[in-house]
Amino acid sequence: MIDKIKKLKDERDALILAHNYQIPEVIDVADYVGDSFYLSQVAKESDKKVIVFCGVHFMAESAKILSPEKTVLLPVKDAGCPLAEMVDIDELEKFKKQHPDAAFVCYINTNADIKALCDVTVTSSNAVKIIKKIPNKKIVFLPDKNLGEFVKENVPEKDIILWAGFCPTHRRISKENIISMKRIVQDLVVLAHPECEKEVREIADFVGSTKEIIDYATNTNYTNYLIATEEGVIHSLKKMNPDKNFYVPGLSATCPNMKKTRLEDVYESLLFMKHEINIDEDIAAKARKALEKMLELAR
Ligand code: 13P
């Protein structure tokens, strides 16, 4: 299957991108593996005609918005993100009328029509940096409450209004589990994603995006790490750090949507050119402004 995918990929002039949460086989067949920000940059800069995005819908959609001339494929059509569905467009429009002086900042985990109504998009790796640079004092941040709270803690000079969204997978990571793991494993270094609840972030030694978590573990010299994010990152961590130990906080941090894509889906995606991402041009043009503003401010 791997050989068939590679052959077809060359025939189609395609690039395979995989998010850090994908299953090991898919990560291993990808040309680039990374966090949401890194993959959106790779998608934009690539000169390939076709991008197969092994991730969830908003990721492939963002790649298409940034590279309208490319064919962007999402191997599994219903690989979605529940967090991205937590913004209601009517409610957002109402909010915009109520806060005309605020900058509207959306997490990349949103659908294109929501990005189209916002000033700038951010990811977990650049949210703090970008929000510090926005001139408005008042910011409305959506939809992830936990990432928003993390930004608030790091940018106290801004008046940040939070949406009430959350990632169901990160919500299942509990402080109690981490504390009991710390009792069992000595000198356990806790690395957490900012989508984790505040009480988890508070006991973490480092908080960052999936790529930042992988980089932190790779560039430090501890032996035991507890990884408080979706367990898919463990595959790359082990490959890059065979002498270190990685633990997960219980067995619940698995994102069902990120696990939907199998090698067969990647192959069929290339074979039948499915499922192609198409976005209304007007919405895409507006959403592109928010995504391009992110690329500019993240520099
Ligand atoms: P990263 O940008 O850190 O890879 O996170 C994406 C995501 O959806 C986390 O749940």
Image (cartoon, rainbow, N blue to C red):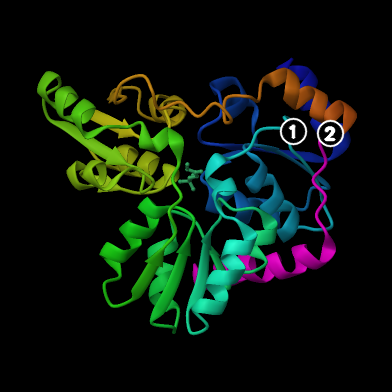
Say which residue label 1 marks.
Answer: 77
Q: Looking at the rendering, in which quadrant would you find the N terminus?
A: top right
Question: What residue is shown at x 45% (from left), y 79% (from top)?
Answer: 134
Q: Is mark 2 within 8 Å of ligand 1?
A: no
Q: Closer to the camera, 234 or 139?
A: 139
Q: Residues within 10 Å of mark 2 (few under 14, many from 20)?
A: many
Q: Residues within 10 Å of mark 1 (few under 14, many from 20)?
A: some
| Residue 294 picture location, percent across and down | 55, 67
Q: Closer to the camera, 214 or 93?
A: 93
| Residue 114 picture location, percent across and down | 63, 60
Front: mark 1 or 2: 1
Q: Quadrant of residue 81?
A: top right
Evaluate if marks 1 and 2 touch, with contact meaning CB atoms under 8 Å apart: yes
Q: Quadrant of residue 30?
A: top right
Task: Tell me if I can see residue 299 in this picture.
Answer: no
Question: What residue is shown at x 83% (from left), y 63% (from top)?
Answer: 281
Is 276 magenta? The answer is: yes
Specify start and end residues of the magenta stretch as a single range.
274-298
Q: Amino acid at mark 1?
A: Lys
Is 295 magenta? The answer is: yes
Helix or strand or loop: what does disc 2 sit on? loop
Number of dots carrying numbers: 2
Say which residue label 2 marks.
Answer: 274
Q: Amino acid at mark 2?
A: Lys
Q: Is mark 1 within 8 Å of ligand 1?
A: no
Which secondary structure dominates the residues rendered in magenta?
helix
Q: Which mark is residue 253?
A: none
